[in-house]
């Protein structure tokens, strides 16, 4: 059975390092070999520092996949959706490789990141590095708990991991990444009561409003969708806050067995319903990047090395 990469369904950590690369070398065999070596780096640090709860993920960009693995294409692999409505836009900034490093120790994230960079620097350009961190009791910097509706336990696997429906890529996951910039000055001028209306849940104890009490433009309404059969449209979020004294936000990462749920949620947030009720959180938190990837199983990465 194909084994998913540990970082896809891992439990939340205290620290993260997100690395995005563009490949500059045509030697695809070398790149494939080095991606497999990254799994060994993750495993080494996980064994040597088991208390740090190390997890990692290697994902290949939708635009780069066919260059790297010619003739082997995940069935639903597609570019990041370029969506614009009025002044709302989810920008597309394609990258070839996305490496997610997470642990309960910042120094371990850094050490792994250095090894990954040293491994790739001759063949790829580092275009972004973002440090994520756990904030208080798992909250976003807006003050609200992040990822409240994430699937739990074994349901994570059912939501995030490709199964027998695409047997060549079983154990893999479709990954979407966005870096959001928060306007916290503006957000903090909004009363907590109105923040709760915008979010569709209480701030202090993270209780979702009853369906009848949620406004159509709330974040909860626009992201908690159901399909035509009434079943929830779900993704597994592996997002974490980031920031310094001047810029703060959320590094959003979603994993799913299909790209469609993410695209449906994105469309709902940006375009809204027929009455124009979009996700009002977008007035305070704006995406600055967006890219689509596929994270293959461990066996696939090693077999193709």
Image (cartoon, rainbow, N blue to C red):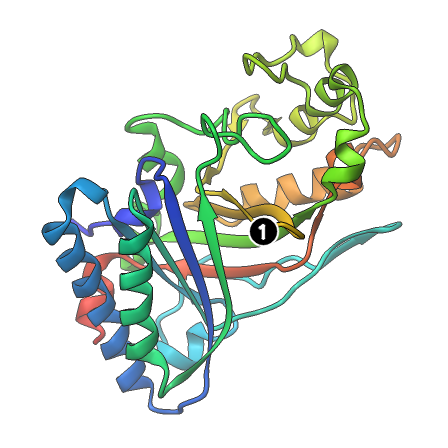
Residue 208: x %, y % from top left: 60, 14
155 above or below 67? above
Of residue 111 and residue 272, the one placed in the foreground of this image is 111
229 or 63: which is nearer to us? 63
The reply to whether residue 70 is in sight is no
Q: How many marks?
A: 1
Residue 89, image x and y in percent? 77, 54
Left or right: 198, with 49 as reference point: right
Residue sitting nearer the eye, 53 or 150: 53
x then y, percent, for residue 98:
43, 64
Position in image of residue 247 (x %, y %): 65, 52
Residue at the spot 49% in from the left edge and 43% down from the top edge: 239
Rendered residue at 26%/56% (across/down)? 297
The extreme bottom residue here reads 26
Q: Tell me: residue 169, above or below residue 145.
A: below
Q: How crowded is mark 1: few (under 14 residues within 10 Å), some or many (20 or more)?
A: few
Please tell me in which quadrant of the rendered image residue 124 appears: bottom left
Q: Is residue 33 above or below residue 89?
A: below
Quarter of the image containing the C terminus? bottom left
User: In which image quadrant can residue 199 be found?
Assistant: top right
Task: Please name whichever residue, 105 or 82, is drawn nearer the observer in this view of the structure.
Answer: 105
Q: In this image, 286 relative to 206: left or right?
A: right
Q: Which residue lies furthest to the front in this view?
A: 245
- Residue 133 shown left or right of residue 5 in the figure: right
What residue is disc 1 on? 244
Residue displayed at 71% across by 18% down = 196
Residue 261 location, quadrant: top right
- Element marked by disc 1: loop
| Residue located 35% across and 76% down the image | 69
Query: Does residue 154 appear left or right of residue 274 in this picture?
Result: left
Kindly tell me whether residue 93 is visible in this rendering: yes
């Amino acid at each position: 059975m194909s084994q998913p990469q540990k970082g896809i369904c891992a439990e939340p950590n205290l620290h993260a390092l997100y690395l995005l690369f563009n490949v500059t070398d045509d030697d695809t065999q070398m790149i494939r070999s080095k991606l497999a070596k990254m799994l060994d780096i993750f495993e080494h640090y996980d064994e040597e520092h088991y208390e740090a709860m190390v997890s990692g993920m290697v994902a290949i960009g939708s635009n780069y996949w066919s260059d790297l693995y010619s003739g082997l294409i995940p069935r639903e692999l597609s570019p990041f959706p370029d969506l614009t409505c009025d002044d709302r836009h989810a920008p597309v900034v394609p990258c070839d490789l996305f490496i997610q490093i997470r642990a309960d120790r910042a120094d371990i994230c850094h050490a792994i990141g250095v090894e990954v960079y040293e491994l790739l620097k001759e063949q790829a350009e580092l275009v972004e590095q973002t440090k994520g961190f756990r904030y208080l009791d798992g909250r976003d910097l807006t003050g609200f708990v992040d990822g409240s509706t994430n699937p739990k336990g074994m349901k994570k696997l059912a939501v995030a991991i490709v199964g027998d429906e695409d047997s060549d890529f079983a154990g893999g996951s479709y990954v979407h990444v966005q870096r959001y910039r928060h306007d916290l000055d503006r957000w903090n001028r909004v009363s907590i009561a109105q923040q709760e209306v915008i979010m569709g849940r209480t701030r202090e104890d993270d209780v979702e409003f009853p369906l009848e009490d949620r406004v159509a433009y709330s974040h909860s309404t626009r992201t908690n969708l159901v399909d035509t059969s009434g079943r929830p449209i779900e993704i597994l979020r592996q997002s974490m806050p980031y920031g310094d004294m001047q810029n703060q936000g959320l590094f959003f990462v979603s994993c799913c067995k299909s790209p469609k749920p993410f695209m449906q949620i994105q469309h709902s947030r940006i375009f809204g319903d027929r009455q124009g009720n979009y996700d009002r959180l977008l007035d305070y938190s704006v995406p600055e990047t967006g890219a689509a990837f596929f994270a293959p199983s461990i066996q696939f990465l090693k077999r193709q090395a």
